[in-house]
Image (cartoon, grey):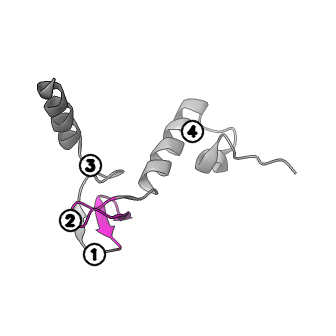
Amino acid sequence: MAKRTDKAGSSGRYGTRYGVVIRKLTRDIERSQRSRFECPSCHHKSVKRVASGIWACRHCDAKFAAACYSPRTREAVSKEILAAHSKE
């Protein structure tokens, strides 16, 4: 029996509907929001999404608000990039 959602991932539930670009964007967003991230307080890789914009560490029970699909905001990412370029 063939595995139907190897490439499609979680967006395989849509079948052929909505177009390939939308399905790929949905797959990538859902993959990132369901993965584990590093906790800003205890630095364990155990932060999971509780609700839209609410993240919780399963190791130290810390809860914090951040972006909707990842616990890093755009401002934090751009500051990291600027800091890396200024060191060069």
Residue at the spot x=75%, y=46% of the render? 4
* Residue 12 locus on image (x, y percent): 66, 47
Name the N-terminal-most of marks 4 and 2: 4
Q: Observer-nearest residue: 80 or 21? A: 80
Residue at the spot x=24%, y=70% of the render? 63
Residue at the spot x=33%, y=64% of the render? 44
* Disc 1 and disc 4 in contact, CB within 8 angstroms: no
Residue ID for mark 1: 60
Amino acid at circle 2: Ser
Amino acid at circle 1: Cys
Task: Say whether residue 76 is left or right of residue 59.
Answer: left
* Disc 2 and disc 1 in contact, CB within 8 angstroms: yes
Amino acid at circle 3: Arg
Task: Say whether residue 25 is left or right of residue 61.
Answer: right
* Residue 3 locus on image (x, y percent): 78, 48
- Mark closer to the observer (2, 3): 2
Residue ID for mark 4: 23
Q: Residue furthest right?
A: 1
For marks 2 and 3, give the CA distance.
Answer: 14 Å
Task: Say whether residue 9 is left or right of residue 38.
Answer: right
Q: Which mark is residue 78?
A: none
User: Splitting the image into 4 quarters, where does residue 52 fall?
Assistant: bottom left
Residue ID for mark 3: 72
Q: Magenta residues?
A: 38-58
Residue at the spot x=19%, y=43% of the render? 76
For marks 4 and 2, give the CA distance.
Answer: 35 Å
For marks 3 and 4, give the CA distance.
Answer: 23 Å
User: Splitting the image into 4 quarters, where does residue 82 fall?
Assistant: top left
Residue ID for mark 2: 41
